[in-house]
Amino acid sequence: MFSKSVKTLIIVLFISFNSFAQSKYTLSGSITDGRSNETLIAVNLYISELNATVSTNQYGFYSITLPEGKYTVIASYLGYETNTKNINLSTNLRLNFALLSSGEELQEVVITDNSKKSNIRSTEMSVNKLSISSIKKMPVVLGEVDVIKSLLLLPGVTNAGEGASGFNVRGGGADQNLILLDEATIFNSSHVFGFFSVFNPDAIKDLKLYKGGIPANFGGRAASVLDIYQKDGNSKSFHANGGIGLISSRLLLEGPIVKDKGSFLIGGRSSYAHLFLKLSEKNKDNSAYFYDLNAKLSYKLNPNNNLYFSGYFGRDVFAISKSFSNTYGNTTLNLRWNHLFSDKLFSNFSLIYSDYYYGLDLNFIGFKWDSGIKNYNIKYDFKNYISDNFKLSYGVNAIYYSFNPGTIKPSDEESGINPDQLDKKYAFEPALYISAEHDLSEKIALTYGLRYSLFYRLGQSTLNLYENDNPVIFNSDQQIYEKATPIGTKFYDKNKVLKSFDNLEPRLAVSYKLSNDEAIKASYNRMVQYLQLISNTSSPTPLDIWMPSDNYIKPQIADQVALGYFRNFDNNKYSLEVETYYKKVQNRLDYIDGADLIANDAIEQVILNGRMRSYGLEVMLRKNEGRLNGWISYTLSKSEQQTPGRTADELGINNGEWYRSIYDKTHNIAVTASYQQSKKWTYGANFALQTGQPVTYPNGQYSYLGVIIPNYGLRNDNRLPTYHHLDVSATLTPTKNQDRNWKGEWVFSIYNLYNRKNAASINFSQNLDTGGNEAVKTSIFGIVPAVSYNFKF
């Protein structure tokens, strides 16, 4: 009897389990733009019967497992019409959506945010997304739409001043930002020494800035990740769009190679302000211009396989007569394969090449200078949709670096300059990661992961040897740091390991949903940066040199924690985001007084390993809907650096005390707004105010051999004046646009409306009349009006 009962129970359990196992099925597919077949990133799918949601990944794919049944599936995306489908889920189902744009604006873009409202359910925090349509409406200097400048309106993001290149995130340096374009590293993101960015807005599909809570698939930088993807191209029909401005013009072409399967995209920009110099007899041999090219090929082999080949090429050229010329820029290539193993397992395989080149031709002294950095990257990423509540991401990547600190060549054989090559450097950086998205309950969601990174500094190279392995010595008599004299050298053959590092980089983020409209979130991440930018300026310049970690230059290790409160209110019309953070960085480089960084083949003799810390509060209030929308952001923060003495007798920098880093901005206020008065007129405005950048002023002077010499006080103990400006714009879209294929618009803008003379720098020089030192302020921009014409057909 017992035996029969047990058998019956086993049969019942087996049938029940089998029935349960078969009662769930996977709904998956891709979501595209209905007019171009462009994949859409972060589209929301909502299953109304279960109150469940899922979003597309960065390649437009989604997957969700549901119980068997009939459902209403709603696909919604800002700027697109909502698409609703009714399904009967009785087997695994591939369901694709093609969304149609809700408007016919000139700036109709595939790229819009999933929604401007805060994502309460997601663990994602310290992340900002901007749509290209929003960026194009922002007034900017000389009318040039600029991705990097738009980031400066976000909380926690500043720059080193007007006209400066790069951007600073939460008190970090511009070199601590990982900038990716179609997964390829961009080492210099600026044109014209920082006035404009290298990103053509017409070619960009999506961009996202991670300031913290950085996913485990990213590594290699200590402060942030700016992840940018180019558009795939229109596989349905041929289109073109572009713009004509005061100093540059752009044109982008896209269309099908094979209708609905393959597409191309090619876009170019070029400035032409230098052509006006040719009209002047005095300046006809001078030039200052930039150009760049974006290209992409996409092909759908079958429903499970897609191939992409993308590239970027950009150059800046600056020349003075025939005596001086400077050329620099980026080159990137990426061959990518998306493969769907099953309706639950998505993969992306990439082969990536990136090259940053800097060239200087000094004809007046007879030599040429070439330098740069190249990397070759192979990566394989997987996304496994194990269940509706548990998703796993994992992958590997390996980067090989080639550094050229400098090659000196004679301009001609009669120059008298002997060729010289600074010691080239090589490195290898492999890594692997795993990360999980885990919904523990209706209220609690987790994202946790681990990245394991390694770094090998490789030969062929010659390493200087120093007594006690100390390339910098402290002169206690004069209380100054001095270069140590090498006691010998050691040569390492090609690919021989000089030094190796390995680090575990944990990542954790948690979200607790207080209600459907508000949540508390927290995150922790460790980031390791093995490359160092050798620069003692507040803003990156083309002459700066990237160096790998080695026996004397240690990798930067950054730990950051953040806590935030997020709320949507008034039916999602408004969003409030409040975050506080604390970050510390080990092994942040500092430089001894009088450090010579250019063409220095023993850079270890002028640097010291210090540390940084930064902390702050960020507030962002956003209006998401209506004719008037935009945001107000405020950041209260502090960023400090310390380089203490290595022994009890050694003072360190600034007597070993904490001092302001050059990225410290106590207050940062930004306001941006867009108002659509009618279909014909749209207005925009930006206001920015930042505490002045830390600098070091002289606190006295002394006379030596009849020359007045300033005496400088503690490092970064002073500040430039407060930085602020107001910019406005008006966009005119002719009503006749609606009745023809050619659509155009005029954009009128004024940068720095009230003509604020912001200080780019303050220098001190001797007044020939009084003999004393006097301050001289340098300002770059006053009021700058501009007009541009944008078109598409």
Image: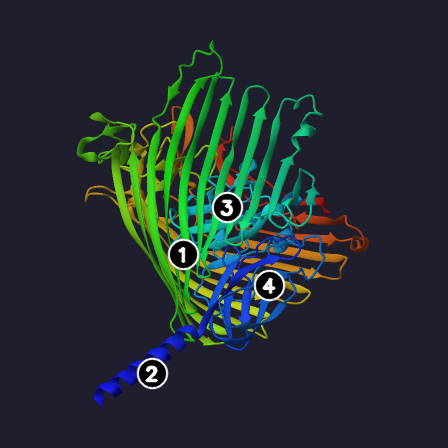
Give the label on residue 77, or none: 4
Relative to 125, is 196 on the left or the right? right
Residue drawn at point x = 33 percent, y = 44 percent: 430
Who comes first in sequence, dot 4 or dot 1? 4
Q: Secondary structure at mark 1?
A: loop
Residues marked 4 and 3 touching at CB (< 8 Å): no
Who comes first in sequence, dot 3 or dot 2? 2
Residue at the top extreme of this rendering? 414
Q: Give the crowd class for mark 4: few <14, some 14-19, many >=20 residues within 10 Å.
A: many
Who comes first in sequence, dot 1 or dot 3? 3
Who comes first in sequence, dot 2 or dot 1? 2
Examine the rendering and report whether any part of residue 220 can be seen: yes
Q: Secondary structure at mark 3?
A: loop
* Residue at image mark 1: 215
Residues marked 2 and 1 touching at CB (< 8 Å): no
Amino acid found under the numbered disc labelled 4: Tyr
Q: Nearer the viewer, residue 789 or 699?
A: 789
* Residue at image mark 2: 12
Amino acid found under the numbered disc labelled 2: Val
Q: Position of residue 610 (x, y in %)?
A: 30, 45
Give the label on residue 182, or none: 3
Q: CA distance from mark 1 to mark 3?
A: 17 Å
Q: Position of residue 549 (x, y in %)?
A: 31, 39
Amino acid found under the numbered disc labelled 1: Pro
Relative to 758, is 587 on the left or the right? left
Residue drawn at point x = 45 percent, y = 45 percent: 350
Who comes first in sequence, dot 4 or dot 3? 4
Q: Give the crowd class for mark 2: few <14, some 14-19, many >=20 residues within 10 Å.
A: few
Who comes first in sequence, dot 4 or dot 2? 2
